[in-house]
Every structure is written in C-alpha cells, then in structure tokens.
C-alpha cells in the first residue's frame, strides 16, 4: 500500500490536505491527475445511471439542509453512531468493532466500557451560534433525494418504478479514519435511489446488486478481487430491511466499497411524519396510494478511486523492455481502463534536439488538446518518457520521429502491450476517438 500512496503523491494524484500545516484530520486533496481520474469515475457512474438505464433522473441537492431532515432520518439518534472505546491511560479512542482485546492497541492500558458516538458533523448557519442556528453537514447524500421526492415526481411526470441519481460530498466524524482515502471524514458518494412498489423490492434488490457488480467489472476491475457479502441483521444500518456490501480485496484486506440496501419505506414515511407532508405515491391505474420502497446503491467516489488505483497498480521487476539498463529497474505500470485513465494521450518527439521534430510534436499536441486530455513531454530518453506515462496509466503514447518529417505519419504505442502502429496525422483524431471511445 505504501508504494501506491507514494506514487499517488509523487505523480500528482492525491495530496494530504493542509500538508504544509502538518495535515488535517484524514482529509485529502486530489491533484491534477487525481481530479481528472475522479471526474472520469464520476462520469462513468453518471453515464451508467442516466444513459444506460431507463427511468433514472439526476439531482444535485444542497449539502446543508434543515436539521429536521436528520431527526426524521434517524441520524441524530443512536441509529447513526459507532461504538467507541477510550483508553484510560493515553485517552486514545477506537471503534469498538476494531478492538480485538481488552487492552489499548497503542499503550496496552485498560479500556473504558464502550459508548455510542454520533458521527454527524455539527455546524452553525447565520451570525448566532445557538441551538436555533445548528445545522449538520450531510452524512449521506440520499436524504437530499428523499426530501425532493415529490418535486421530482411532479416536475418530471415520473411513474413508479424510477430512480434518482446523485453524486456529492458527504461528511462523517469517523472515530478511526485511515487506510489512505478508504475512510475519511470528507468524501464523495455516488448514490442511486430506486423507488418501486413494495412487492417488487426483492426483485430490484437482486437486479441492482448484479448491475453494480457489472459496472466495476466492465471498467476492468479483476473478478477475483470483488465479492458480495450479505450484512447480518444486527450489523445492518438503522434504515435497512436488507443490506449487502460489495467488497474489494484491498492490500489491507476485504472491505466494503458499496452498500446495496432495501430501505423499505423508512425514509419516505418518516419524512411524511416529521414534515406533515403526505409523500405517498398515487397510482392512477390501480388507484392505490402507498409509500414506495427504496432500493439504494450507495458507492463512494473516493473509495472507487482507491479500488481502481490498487487494481491497476503493477510492479514489473527488471522492467518490460529487455535493454541492459532496464533490467536493473523496477517499472511501475498503472493498467487503468481507458475511461478511467487521467491522461488519454501523450505526445512525444523522439528526441528534443531536433527543432523540426519538436515543432511537429507540438503541432500534433495542439491539434489533439481540444479533443482529449493530453500531455506533451520532451524531457529524457524516449524509453524513460514511455515509462513515465505507463506509471500514471496514460492509454496511448504518440511519437513523432524522423519518418514523421518525411510522410506526416507518427506511431501510436499501446501502454499494456507496448505494440506500436504507424498512422497518418490527418487521420489521427478519428482513429483516437474510435480507440478511446469518446
Ligand atoms: N446512503 C447509504 C450510505 O451512506 P454507507 O454504507 O454508510 O451507506 C456508502 O456508505 C458508501 O459510501 C460506502 O460503501 C463507501 O464507499 C462510502 N463511504 C462511507 N463512509 C465513508 C468514509 N468515511 N470515507 C470514504 N468513503 C465512505
């Protein structure tokens, strides 16, 4: 894991938040390559929901909501709390479910009896910091969907079954954040809420778990690193009738990357009760009025990011090219799916001391830049530059060589096979659009 973290920092994927001040509470910043990659992940999820499925619409709700939302949802009560144990000697705090013995893992001191610790992050709006001004940073994005259920139903003239998809920030005061960006206090969720008739809930619960598994597989995640785990009843979230976790085999073990929940009518019935607004659905055909059941797929953009990074990371001892120099080196290869890779194309002049070659390569770069996320690189030997691109998962490298100057062609090099083919510059945009599927 330390090699992945170090690559992420060295190559501009992920930095610790407020690093010059010693970092801040397990928060992270996504650097130039990180933000491209995270945007690609979110786009792949959004396209999957909005384009590849019927009857799903989007939403971008505010992070700050009425505190009543969180009373109704059950997040301010025991439902949304982790068991915490504190060490009597060093006063460090741990999640009770992560403690294997009666002793403090840090100093072996005695532990206090576990108590509940609410994970909501409190804030204030307006000039007075009193009870009336108290608000919370949302702990799950889906509550913004439930409180807009009626608005969306009416404005979009939808009929059950339908879905509402949303991507956005969520915040939790985690007791033990850690494992890099796996568990942080600020993170992004990608959530689908699927509203259906209660009698269809079981069918859709099964349907959506299969769809979500397929999404990761289609984006190149290895099958053997994914599994589905039924969550035992006593460990299920307070709102769930049935829950399962999609898990990934991280270097630090099998861990949840996405939750699939049958939330029943928990949310809509509670919001009806607390707001006084009847949020039941009326079926014009059957004349039935009922609370739809909600099947939710709740993934994390940051956690998926870590999945893509871990799954793609490879170290090739001795390097992939068999030149004497390379055999001594460890080469890093990031085998990211083309839709996820932060840089799609790198343009490289074969050498930098031939002005005509450099000029040509820069022209090609300018030609491609409006169409693809591109990089231009002329520093170091061509082999070293290929390796620099392989290390960040760049899908294709284009090299302008001496033949380019004669016949307006260049080579396309494929990251995973290192195979090269020669194409005409005039055909380049169409060829790349086809290869990259954009
Ligand atoms: N709306 C349901 C819900 O929030 P969850 O299982 O608590 O369910 C869903 O969270 C997903 O959100 C997790 O599978 C994970 O991908 C992401 N997530 C939750 N807490 C996180 C944290 N502290 N850091 C990073 N990602 C987190």
Image (cartoon, rainbow, N blue to C red):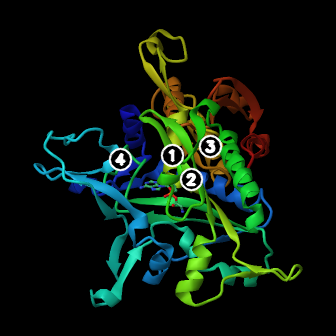
In the picture shown, does residue 397 fall above or below 215?
A: above
The numbered disc on residue 344 is 3
Say left or right for 371 vs 111. right
Marks 1/2: CA–CA distance: 7 Å
Q: Which residue is mark 2?
A: 259
Label 1 lies in ligand 1 vicinity (Cβ under 8 Å): yes
Outermost residue, left direction?
89
Q: Of label 1 and label 4, which has the lower sequence position?
A: 4
The numbered disc on residue 97 is 4
Q: Which residue is mark 1?
A: 256
Q: Position of residue 149 (x, y in %)?
A: 66, 78
Q: Residue at x 54, y 17 (%)?
A: 320
Q: Position of residue 121 (x, y in %)?
A: 35, 69
Q: Residue at x 41, y 13 (%)?
A: 328
Q: Residue at x 45, y 78 (%)?
A: 71
Residue 225 lies in what quarter of the image? top right
Q: Which type of secondary structure does the marked residue at label 1 adopt?
A: strand
Label 2 lies in ligand 1 vicinity (Cβ under 8 Å): yes
Q: Of label 1 and label 3, which has the lower sequence position?
A: 1
Q: Which type of secondary structure does the marked residue at label 3 adopt?
A: loop
In the picture shown, does residue 148 fall above or below 427?
A: below
Marks 3/4: CA–CA distance: 42 Å
């Amino acid at each position: 894991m330390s090699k992945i973290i170090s690559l992420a920092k060295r190559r501009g994927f992920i930095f610790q938040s407020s690093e010059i001040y010693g970092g801040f509470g397990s928060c992270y910043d996504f650097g130039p390559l990180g933000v491209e990659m995270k945007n690609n992940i979110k786009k792949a999820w959004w396209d999957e929901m909005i384009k590849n499925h019927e009857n799903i619409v989007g939403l971008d709700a505010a992070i700050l909501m009425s505190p009543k939302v969180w009373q109704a949802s059950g997040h301010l009560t025991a439902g949304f709390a982790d068991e915490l144990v504190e060490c009597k000697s060093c006063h460090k705090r741990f999640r009770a479910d992560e403690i294997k013995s009666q002793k403090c893992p840090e100093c072996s001191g005695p532990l206090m009896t576990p108590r509940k610790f609410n994970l909501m992050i409190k804030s204030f709006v307006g000039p007075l910091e009193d009870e009336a001004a108290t608000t919370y940073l949302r702990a799950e994005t889906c509550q913004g969907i439930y409180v807009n259920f009626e608005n969306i139903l009416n404005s979009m003239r939808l009929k059950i079954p339908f879905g509402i998809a949303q991507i956005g920030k969520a915040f939790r005061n985690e007791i033990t954040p850690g494992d890099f960006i796996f568990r942080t206090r600020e993170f992004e969720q990608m959530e689908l809420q699927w509203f259906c008739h209660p009698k269809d809930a079981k069918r859709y619960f099964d349907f959506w778990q299969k769809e979500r598994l397929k999404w990761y597989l289609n984006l190149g995640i290895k099958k053997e690193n994914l599994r589905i785990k039924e969550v035992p009843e006593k460990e299920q979230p307070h709102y769930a009738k049935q829950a399962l976790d999609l898990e990934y085999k991280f270097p630090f073990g099998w861990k949840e990357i996405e939750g699939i929940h049958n939330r029943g009518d928990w949310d809509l019935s509670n919001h009806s009760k607390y707001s006084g607004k009847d949020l039941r659905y009326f079926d014009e055909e059957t004349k039935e009025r009922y609370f739809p059941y909600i099947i939710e797929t709740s993934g994390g953009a940051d956690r998926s990011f870590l999945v893509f990074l871990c799954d793609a990371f490879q170290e090739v001892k001795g390097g992939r090219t068999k030149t004497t120099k390379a055999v001594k080196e460890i080469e890093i290869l990031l085998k990211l799916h083309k839709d996820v890779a932060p840089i799609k194309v790198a343009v490289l002049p074969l050498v930098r001391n031939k002005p005509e070659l450099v000029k040509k390569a820069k022209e090609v770069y300018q030609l491609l830049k409006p169409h693809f996320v591109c990089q231009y690189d002329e520093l170091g030997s061509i082999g070293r530059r290929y390796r620099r691109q392989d290390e960040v998962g760049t899908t294709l490298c284009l090299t302008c060589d001496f033949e380019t100057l004669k016949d307006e062609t260049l080579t396309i090099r494929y990251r995973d096979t290192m195979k090269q083919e020669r194409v005409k510059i005039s055909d380049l945009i169409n060829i790349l659009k086809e290869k990259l599927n954009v």
